[in-house]
Image (cartoon, rainbow, N blue to C red):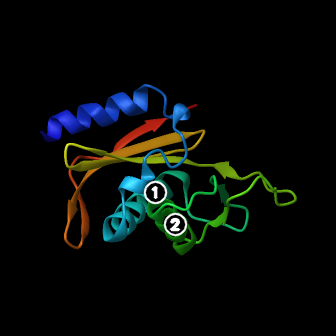
Amino acid sequence: MQNFFSTVIAAALLSGCQGLRPGSDAGAVTGPAASAIAGDMVSRLAEQIGPATAMTTIRMDKDTSEFAIALEAALKGWGYTVVTDKKLVRGIKPVELAYAAESLDGQILARLSTPSIALGRAYRPTGAGAMPASPLSILQRN
């Protein structure tokens, strides 16, 4: 089953995460699972794009799902400035972030995508949150 989800994640990443709709089915991820998945995915994103600096601003679409709220909180916890509207901070070009969290066969497929990188991982919900159910898939774009 783990190989199946690894294949699904790889296919999703390779099929063009640029087509992610922000928050795609993010309402399916709630409570502790939303926080656990957002925390893990943001830590993996930080490994790839580098630590937050005064010039690092992440822009994501405004979304009221629990996953989007947890994602924004995790980004801020890592020191990133997060904007959820089209307003630009003078002199700073924000990193556009698309995200999705979708339920599939009792697991949750989470994806984050920026213009330079796409991450994906399957999670298994638990009573206390969620645990990774697949390796992290990383697609780097030039």
Residue 5: image location, x then y, percent: 22, 38
**Residue beneath the point at 36% across and 58% down:** 29
**Residue beneath the point at 61% across and 66% down:** 80
Residue type highlighted by circle 1: Glu
Residue type highlighted by circle 2: Ile
Q: Is residue 65 above or below residue 1?
A: below
Disc 2 to disc 1, C-alpha distance: 21 Å
Q: Nearer the viewer, residue 85 or 141?
A: 85
- Relative side of 76 to 88, left or right: left
Dividing the picture into quadrants, the one containing residue 39 is bottom left
Judged from the image, the secondary structure of the residue bearing numbered disc 2 is helix
Q: Quadrant of the N terminus?
A: top left
Q: Residues within 10 Å of mark 1 (few under 14, many from 20)?
A: few
- Residue marked by disc 1: 47
Q: Residues within 10 Å of mark 2 (few under 14, many from 20)?
A: some
Q: Residue furthest left?
A: 1
Q: Quadrant of the C terminus?
A: top right
Q: Is residue 142 above or below residue 68?
A: above
- Relative side of 106 to 98, left or right: left
- Residue marked by disc 2: 69
**Residue beneath the point at 46% across and 57% down:** 47
Judged from the image, the secondary structure of the residue bearing numbered disc 1 is helix
